[in-house]
C-alpha cells in the first residue's frame, strides 16, 4: 500500500498551532465537539483527500463511532500515530492502574497478556509491543487502516537509547496487522540510518519536517534534505508551512519540487478552513 500525495493531518483538532497560542486554544475548544471534527473531515473528503493521519487522542472515540454508525467517508484510509502518552497519564491520575493499563490490555487481547509478560521478563519485547499497538488502535476497529506510525517522542527516544530491537518489533507488529509501519521523527538522518542500516528495513516510511525555512529540520536543513533525497526511505513531509517568512504558496512550491523529483512521496498538512483545505489539496494533487 502507498499513500496519496496529500495526507490530511489533525494538528488543528488538538489545538496545535506553532505560531499563535491564542488560535491554538480556540481550536482546542472548538474541536472538543465531535461534530466540528466530522465537518472538517467532510471538507477534506470532498476535496479529494483519502488519507487521514491522526494522534490516538480520546476525542476521536466519538468521531469514529459516528463514522462507523453513519458509514461516512467511503474509501477514506486511516493512519493512527501512537502512543498518545497523555491519555495514559490522565487515566492513571483519575482512575488508577486498572483503568489505564489492565482494562485496555484485556480489551485488546486477553490471551496475549501472559505470554507478553513472560517475554518481557526474559528480555523479549516483541509480544508486548504487539499488544500495546493493538491497545492503541482499538478506537480504529472497523475502519480501514493504511498505516500505523510511531510518534516522534517514541521514535527519537528509542533511537537515543539505541533500542533498535523495539523499533523493529513495532514494524513487525504493524505488518502482522496488515498495515504499513511508519516512523515520525525530528531527526530524519539518524532515523534513516538506524532503520535501514542497523535494522535492515527496506525503504520504510518516515515522516519528518521538510520546509523552506528549515523549521525543526534537525540536525540541519541541508542534512535533512540530503537524507530525504538518499532514496533509502519513502518520505512524508510535515510542517511544510511552518516558519514561513514569505508566501505560503512559495513554501508549498518548495516541497512540491521535492515531490516532482521523488524526494518527497506525500505531504501531510492540516487546516480548519475548508477553503485552505481545497486550495492545498488541489495544489498538491494536480501538480
Image (cartoon, grey):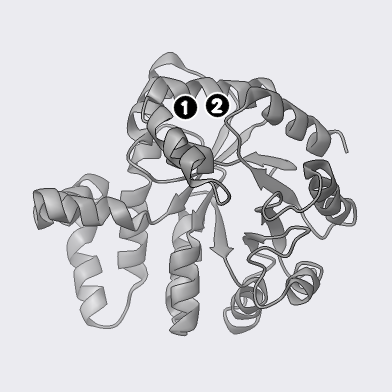
Q: Where residue 187 sits in the image (x, y, percent)?
A: 61, 72
Q: In which quarter of the image is residue 216?
A: bottom right
68 left or right of 120? right
69 left or right of 284? left
Question: With respect to residue 173, does 250 lie above or below?
Answer: above
- Element carrying mark 2: helix
- Element carrying mark 1: helix
Q: In which quarter of the image is residue 206?
A: bottom right
Q: Can residue 73 be seen in this view?
A: no
Q: Where residue 135 sits in the image (x, y, percent)?
A: 31, 50
Say which residue label 1 marks.
37
Disc 2 and disc 1: Cα gap in Å? 6 Å
Q: Residue 41 carries which label?
A: 2
Q: Which residue occupies the foreground of this view, 38 or 108?
A: 38
Question: With respect to residue 53, does 39 lie above or below?
Answer: above
Residue furthest out toward the top: 70
Amino acid at each position: 500500500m502507498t499513500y496519496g500525495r496529500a495526507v490530511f493531518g489533525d494538528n488543528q483538532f488538538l489545538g496545535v498551532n506553532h505560531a499563535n497560542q491564542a488560535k491554538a486554544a480556540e481550536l482546542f475548544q472548538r474541536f472538543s465537539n465531535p461534530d466540528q471534527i466530522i465537518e472538517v473531515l467532510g471538507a477534506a473528503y470532498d476535496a479529494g483527500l483519502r488519507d487521514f493521519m491522526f494522534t490516538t487522542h480520546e476525542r476521536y472515540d466519538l468521531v469514529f463511532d459516528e463514522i462507523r454508525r453513519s458509514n461516512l467517508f467511503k474509501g477514506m484510509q486511516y493512519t493512527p500515530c501512537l502512543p498518545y502518552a497523555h491519555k495514559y497519564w490522565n487515566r492513571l491520575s483519575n482512575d488508577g492502574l486498572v483503568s489505564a493499563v489492565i482494562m485496555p490490555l484485556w480489551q485488546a487481547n486477553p490471551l496475549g497478556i501472559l505470554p507478553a509478560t513472560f517475554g518481557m521478563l526474559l528480555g523479549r519485547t516483541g509480544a508486548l509491543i504487539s499488544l500495546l499497538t493493538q491497545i492503541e488502535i482499538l478506537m480504529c476497529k472497523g475502519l480501514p487502516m493504511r498505516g500505523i506510525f510511531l510518534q516522534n517522542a517514541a521514535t527519537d527516544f528509542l533511537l537515543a537509547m539505541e533500542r533498535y530491537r523495539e523499533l523493529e518489533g513495532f514494524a513487525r507488529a504493524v505488518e502482522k496487522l496488515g498495515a504499513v509501519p511508519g516512523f515520525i521523527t525530528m531527526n530524519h538522518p539518524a532515523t534513516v540510518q538506524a532503520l535501514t542500516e542497523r535494522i535492515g528495513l527496506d525503504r520504510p516510511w518516515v515522516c519528518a519536517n521538510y520546509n523552506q525555512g528549515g523549521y525543526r529540520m534537525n540536525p540541519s536543513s541541508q542534512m535533512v534534505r540530503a537524507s530525504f533525497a538518499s532514496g533509502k526511505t519513502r518520505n512524508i513531509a510535515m510542517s511544510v508551512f511552518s516558519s514561513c517568512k514569505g508566501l505560503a504558496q512559495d513554501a508549498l512550491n518548495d516541497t512540491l519540487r521535492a515531490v516532482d523529483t521523488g524526494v518527497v512521496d506525500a505531504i501531510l498538512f492540516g487546516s480548519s478552513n475548508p477553503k485552505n483545505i481545497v486550495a492545498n489539496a488541489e495544489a498538491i494533487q494536480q501538480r
